[in-house]
Amino acid sequence: MPDLQRIIDNIHAELLPQLGTGKVADYIPELAKVNPHRFGIAVATVGGGSYFAGDAGEPFSIQSISKVFSLTLALGKHGDALWSRVGREPSGSSFNSIVQLEHESGVPRNPFINAGAIVVCDAILAGHRPREAIGEILRFVRSVADDDTIAIDPAVAQSEQKTGFRNVALASYMRSFGNLLHPVELTLGVYFHQCAISMTCRQLARAGLFLANGGHMPQTGLTVVSRDRARRICALMLMCGHYDGSGDFAFRVGLPGKSGVGGGILAVAPGQASVAVWSPGLDEHGNSQLGTRALQLLAERTGWSIFG
Ligand code: GLU
């Protein structure tokens, strides 16, 4: 095993002068308040090691990274039937694009663009009230992170509820095709709260460990999903986890990853480790600029890659 603490300390120190580059997401007013000079890295290994640098203990809004957890939960509830409502193809479009939905009759390309994640929330909502569905998602995240202190930031959820007009449009459009089974405001209530979960890099790295470890949590031995399902979730992360920047992320980092507009990225090195990075400055696709660089350097220095 490489000297992970030294590697991430060096990466943190080397990238620190670039802190503040990129653009903090401001289309959600509450996210615009975040200090852009933040940078954290956490690595949790399947062998039980845990390494961190910088602001790895500071909570941030995980935003779209939550889509990995809600997809896992929805697949557990509905199995492969979920794939009749959402596809498994990269989109090549921005995270909140509506154009493909018309061509594809209201069936979103994949579960990680906003439209797809809204359908996944609608599937989780089946048979529940929104409050119960939100509770179920939060409990799931807490259980895979093995940490009951993880919470939803209500100010972020409200901020999105007030300004998420695009998501209202996406959800209404899908409802017109019959691919949303609940009233738009109920499904979106679940979606906005899921995106508003706050976590630290350390918590997030632990929460991704089941994906790095064939579906089992190494901390507790619990099986979260089958090995096949863990592989498939990772395949989707690789192809679709960074919106229209997914190809570039695969090219540069070579690991499955999921980004969020809060500036976080969760990456999985199968059989090795789960990694969380956070820095709020985003590139033109809405992915953390420094976070991506950090993961690229980490992959180079550890030799972690799914391509051998
Ligand atoms: N809550 C955000 C939205 O719906 C998520 C976007 C993201 O993190 O990529 O716009």
Image (tube, helix red, strand yellow):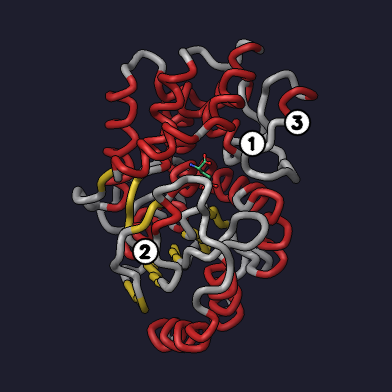
* Residue 155 against residue 190 in the figure, above or below: below
For badge 1, the amino acid type reads: Asn
Query: Considering depth in this image, is 172 or 211 the residue closer to the camera?
Result: 172
Mark 3 or 1 closer to N-term? 3
Q: Where residue 2 sits: x, y (%)? A: 46, 84
* Residue 131 against residue 243 in the figure, above or below: above
Query: Considering depth in this image, is 294 or 55 the residue closer to the camera?
Result: 55
Q: Could you tell me which residue is drawn at 46 percent across and 28 percent down?
A: 121
SS label for mark 1: loop
How dense is the environment of label 1, judged by Cα within 10 Å: few (below 14), some, or many (20 and up)?
many
SS label for mark 3: helix
How dense is the environment of label 2, judged by Cα within 10 Å: few (below 14), some, or many (20 and up)?
many
Quarter of the image for the N terminus: give it: bottom left
Q: Where residue 256 sits: x, y (%)? A: 58, 57
Query: Considering depth in this image, is 152 or 8 the residue closer to the camera?
Result: 152
Query: Considering depth in this image, is 256 or 197 the residue closer to the camera?
Result: 197
Q: Is residue 227 visible?
A: no
User: Quarter of the image holding residue 133?
Assistant: top left
Residue marked by disc 3: 100
Left or right side of 25 for 83: right
SS label for mark 2: helix
Q: Could you tell me which residue is drawn at 46 percent across and 13 percent down?
A: 183
Quarter of the image for the C terminus: give it: bottom right
Q: Distance between the residues labelled 3 and 1?
A: 11 Å
Q: Could you tell me which residue is drawn at 45 percent across and 29 percent down?
A: 74
Mark 2 or 3 closer to N-term? 3
Which of the numbered marks, if any, corresponds to residue 110? 1
Q: Distance between the residues labelled 2 and 3?
A: 33 Å
Mark 2 or 1 closer to N-term? 1
